[in-house]
Image (cartoon, grey):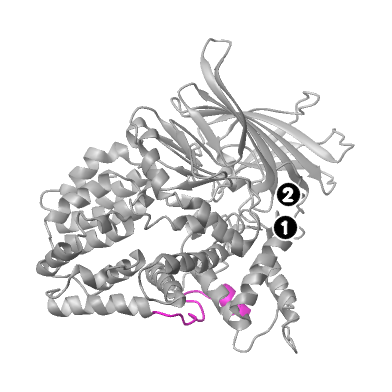
Amino acid sequence: MSKRRLVSPPNDFHDPSTYSNPNIYFTRHLSLELDINPFQKVIKGIVTIEAEILQVEQDPYLVLDTRGLQITQVQDPKTGKNYSYQIEHGKLGSALKVSLRGFSFPDQTVRVRISYTTQGEGEGHPVGGACGWLTPEQTAGGKLPYLFTQSQTIHARSIFPCQDTPSAKTPFTATISVPVEFRAIMSGILIEERRKQVRNDGSTYNLFIFEQTIPVASYLISIAVGELESQELSERCRVWTEPAMVEAACFEFGQTEQFVKAVESVCGAYVWSRYDILCLPPSFPFGAMENPCLTFLTPTLLAGDRSLASVIVHEIVHCWSGNLVTCCNWQDFWLNEGISLFLSRKITSKIRHKDSKLKGSLESFFGLETYLGRVALKQALESLGKGHPYTRLVPDLSDGVDPDDAFGPSPYEKGFNLLLKLERLTGEDKFLRFLRSFFERFQFQSVSTANFIAYFSEYFTANISKPEFDSFGRLVFKGFDWDEWLYSTGDPPEYPEVDLSLVYAAQSLAKLCIETEAKSLTAYEVEGWDSSQMIVFLDSLLSQGNCSQELVKRLDLQLRLNHGPKGKNAEIRLLWLKLALRAHYEPAVENAIEFVTTQGRMKYIRPIYRELHSEFPKGSLAVNTFTKNRKKYHNIASKLLAKDFGLD
């Protein structure tokens, strides 16, 4: 990893979500020194930034993003001379403006060292922060606190001053010290660790030194600190988690090396040296995050049968789409997520088809995943409103819009459908080769939607006898409108046709169960089913309205959904519990309470708490359960649940 990869600074820089100026001073290297204390929930930091001077201004200021940082000193690391600075506050944080007047930079490189302290939570700012400080009760071990960071989209600025934009990618080094009870891991390669170091005051600490030589955007610099153990899965893959979860995580993610190789066969060589996984504590409120060299994963993937393990494929694809080639701003987020979703569905459908006992075609497995994505998109569009500007593939985030507020299925699913349409216009094999070429052409760089379309048009011009272009130089296809795909609200202009035979089989069985009260249902009917097919089946039952208690009882008797192996899959369990609670199927109540009190992923706990609250309101079961277990949940989840119950 010693090879230097040079990032090209942005030509036409535009990112409304940053206050920084990488078009004038471009970060070439970051050095972090972080003293992290999970007991006190505080970070004492020093960041040294080396920035190349791209333009000489009359009023020279290096502008960095911050949020909730207590700046104590800004100086030249070589001379120790202090820089003067000012802080201007805004909707998305603060601009730290370091005055460079009176300083000379003969090598065209500005070097600034900034000392500060922070809790990493934005310190009251409405946008929030990156740090998730967990109490011992919120961990699997229950003994020590824990820290994880989630910097996407614009939260790295709450951990350290930086050019917090995907347009500024830089290598970094990090030296992290933690109390002696803890281990630190992060999105880089560990190059040294020193145990039980002694400070001047006699306190002991552990020191970990990391390096990331591949340029990454600030949102991909992530850290975890806790009681952590690991086990190797292969020469380049390792799983990290709390001691109580190591065995389960090792089994569940045991196919990781196989998945990395499958993605390499489509996307090209893996350049990040290691692909490690961190399985987070039960209270982790999110799904996954593709941090370089260390993917963060929810423990709700631990189904016990690897039925959810292929979720990792999406995160692995991000090592190319998002990490290697990065969207230049959050308006172009679909370049990260749409491409990753498209390729991961291609790859996982092949894996599932190969491993399945079903006789379905490869195309039918791809169609199954595509169908579920389209259902999720349609539900989101109905909830948000099809005319809402955030439903555009490329939304407008100007005027201080928090990118997190615009987060939703559109960049994923509308991006996926655009790419599927382009594949249909050009041919599957050719389009997959194009995406691989795209990664090679723009590796280590940040790109815009315009860059993607320009390269697509250039690449496929040679394959068309008489190519036509619009006024923007974009390749023209009959019946295809670039602007409509990119900027229209609501549904995409088209949902390209896919093989839905596996979907229809599941829907047909659901229809039969409704018509016959499942009297003829046996386990044989679903033998060998893919977990996604079971999800379609349960979702189809839910869409018919409330099922009778007798029907639900028969489902449980034949398919063992309440306490059988299928019910350990969190996606299946969510739908089953919705179905069962609405039918007032009493055996499901205990299952539901266990589900919401043993993990804290918001995708699961909020809807099940709502069902409990709606279907069993007399005894205040849901409220009492939440009140009793509130301290187990992450603050974000706790606040949202309290709001759902009208408690805050």
The residue that label 1 is drawn on is 13
Task: Answer few, some or many: residues within 10 Å of disc 1's Cα (few below 14, many 20 plus, some between 14 and 19).
Answer: some
Left or right: residue 594 compared with residue 19: left
Q: Are marks 2 and 1 in contact (CB under 8 Å)?
A: yes
Our reading of the magenta stretch's main secondary structure is loop
Left or right: residue 491 compared with residue 618: right
The residue that label 2 is drawn on is 22
Left or right: residue 190 compared with residue 277: right
Percent coordinates x, y for residue 555 in the rendering:
17, 66
User: Of the residues shown, which amino acid type is indicated by label 2?
Assistant: Pro
User: Of the residues shown, which amino acid type is indicated by label 1?
Assistant: Phe
- Quarter of image, res 175: top right
Identify the secondary structure beneath mark 2.
loop
N-term mark: 2 or 1 = 1
Give the magenta-colored segment's residue range.
482-500
Percent coordinates x, y for residue 167 in the rendering:
68, 53
Q: State the CA–CA distance, disc 2 to disc 1.
A: 8 Å
